[in-house]
């Protein structure tokens, strides 16, 4: 990134950002997590959820919510029909990884989708390519070196195709419960070290997609907090700034499956801390409560829910992006020049 951004990558980044250069994107590339949501609402095993239900849900969400987003993140397995339903003003990111990981293999190692490449994703309409990586500084050097080499290969493939590379880091602790107190204690370090590592030029990452550096459920004053606080608001703000200090590329926040209210709280903390983040790729915090409506009443009930609570959710997140900075402001020597799509909606 220190060498500047190519014209092709600039076009892709402008395509998924709003008129300010802020990435105000909607994420609905979930597959395994979405099957679980559907399975819970249907009283069925996730594997029994019909693929066409997932595809239809994504189409409805894309139609209803992309007029309020700068872009949508989808998967090529179930999401290509939804990509065709998006607002003409919304850019498109496509996921490259298989959903989940093999629990029989240590380290939550990544796998790519069969039959897809960066060139094929771009040919399918992707302005940018996204890879999800489970990453932890608590993993063994052997596990992390495997992941480092994997990301280097994807970065090189995106560079060859001149397509922006978004790397989504999902933090975890080896042997720790993801939502438990023990991981909450080490999460700030894990998030910071992930940002530090993948900001290195060797990976050719254009934008990092990261979680908040604290588990919001353990922060004093957080909505829906169900645990004893581990961090005061002041301590949380300091941890936000520490994580930011390691970033050498633009970064945006993901919602990690929290409620819309909790996600807003996390973004408010980022703004209060003065963090220079470049937007969001917000998923379940926006649309997850639409799943029961869809299961109960079909597309009509889902569309009613989306036109009310769904739009309210996305607009609430949008209001929290006033503190976000343009992606190009996070790159030394980069201006807002290049191709820019006018009249872009915002999340």
Image (cartoon, rainbow, N blue to C red):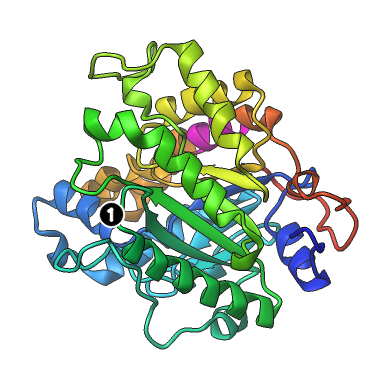
Left or right: residue 55 versus residue 106 is right
Image location of residue 300, percent across then percent down: 36, 50
The quarter of the picture where residue 199 lies is bottom right
Quadrant into which the C terminus falls = top right
Q: Secondary structure at mark 1?
A: helix
- Magenta stretch mostly in which secondary structure? helix
Of 86 and 11, nearer the camera is: 11
Of 59 and 123, nearer the camera is: 123
Image location of residue 324, percent across then percent down: 69, 34
Image location of residue 65, percent across then percent down: 54, 48
| Res. 322 visible in picture | yes
Of 175 and 62, nearer the camera is: 175
For label 1, the residue is 33
Queried whether the magenta region covers residue 315, the answer comes back as yes
Queried whether the magenta region covers residue 34, the answer comes back as no
Residue at point 63% right, 41% down?
279
Chain part drawn in magenta: 311-318
Q: Is residue 130 above or below residue 199?
A: below
Quadrant into which the N terminus falls = bottom right
The quarter of the picture where residue 31 lies is bottom left
Residue at point 54% right, 20% down?
238
Residue at point 51% right, 31% down?
312
Left or right: residue 173 versus residue 305 is left
Count of labels in the image: 1
Residue at point 32% right, 17% down?
230
């Amino acid at each position: 990134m220190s060498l500047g951004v190519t014209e092709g990558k600039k076009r892709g980044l402008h395509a998924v950002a709003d008129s300010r250069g802020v990435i105000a994107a909607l994420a609905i590339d979930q597959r395994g997590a979405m099957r679980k949501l559907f399975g819970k609402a249907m009283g069925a095993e996730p594997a029994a959820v019909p693929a066409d239900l997932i595809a239809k849900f994504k189409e409805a969400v894309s139609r209803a919510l992309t007029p309020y987003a700068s872009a949508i993140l989808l998967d090529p397995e179930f999401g290509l029909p939804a990509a065709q339903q998006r607002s003409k003003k919304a850019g498109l990111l496509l996921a490259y990884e298989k959903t989940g990981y093999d629990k029989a293999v240590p380290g939550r190692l990544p796998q790519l989708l069969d039959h897809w490449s960066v060139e094929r994703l771009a040919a399918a309409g992707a302005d940018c390519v996204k890879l999800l990586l489970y990453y932890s500084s608590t993993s063994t050097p052997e596990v992390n070196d495997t992941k480092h080499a994997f990301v280097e290969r994807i970065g090189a493939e995106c560079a060859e195709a001149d397509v922006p590379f978004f790397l989504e880091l999902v933090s975890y602790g080896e042997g720790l419960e993801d939502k438990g107190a023990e991981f909450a204690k080490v999460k700030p370090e894990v998030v910071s070290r992930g940002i530090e590592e993948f900001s290195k030029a060797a990976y050719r990452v254009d934008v990092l997609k990261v979680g908040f550096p604290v588990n919001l459920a353990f922060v004093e004053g957080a909505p829906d907090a169900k645990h004893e606080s581990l961090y005061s608001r002041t301590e949380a703000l300091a941890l936000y700034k520490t994580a930011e200090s390691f970033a050498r590329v633009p970064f945006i926040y993901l919602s990690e499956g929290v409620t819309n209210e909790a996600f807003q709280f996390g973004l408010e903390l980022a703004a209060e801390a003065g963090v220079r983040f470049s937007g969001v790729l917000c998923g379940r915090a926006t649309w997850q409560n639409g799943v029961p409506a869809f299961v109960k009443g079909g597309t009509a009930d889902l569309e009613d829910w989306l036109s009310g609570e769904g739009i309210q959710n996305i607009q609430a997140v949008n209001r929290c992006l006033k503190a976000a900075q343009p992606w190009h402001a996070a790159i030394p020597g980069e201006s807002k020049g290049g191709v820019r799509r006018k009249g872009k909606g915002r999340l």
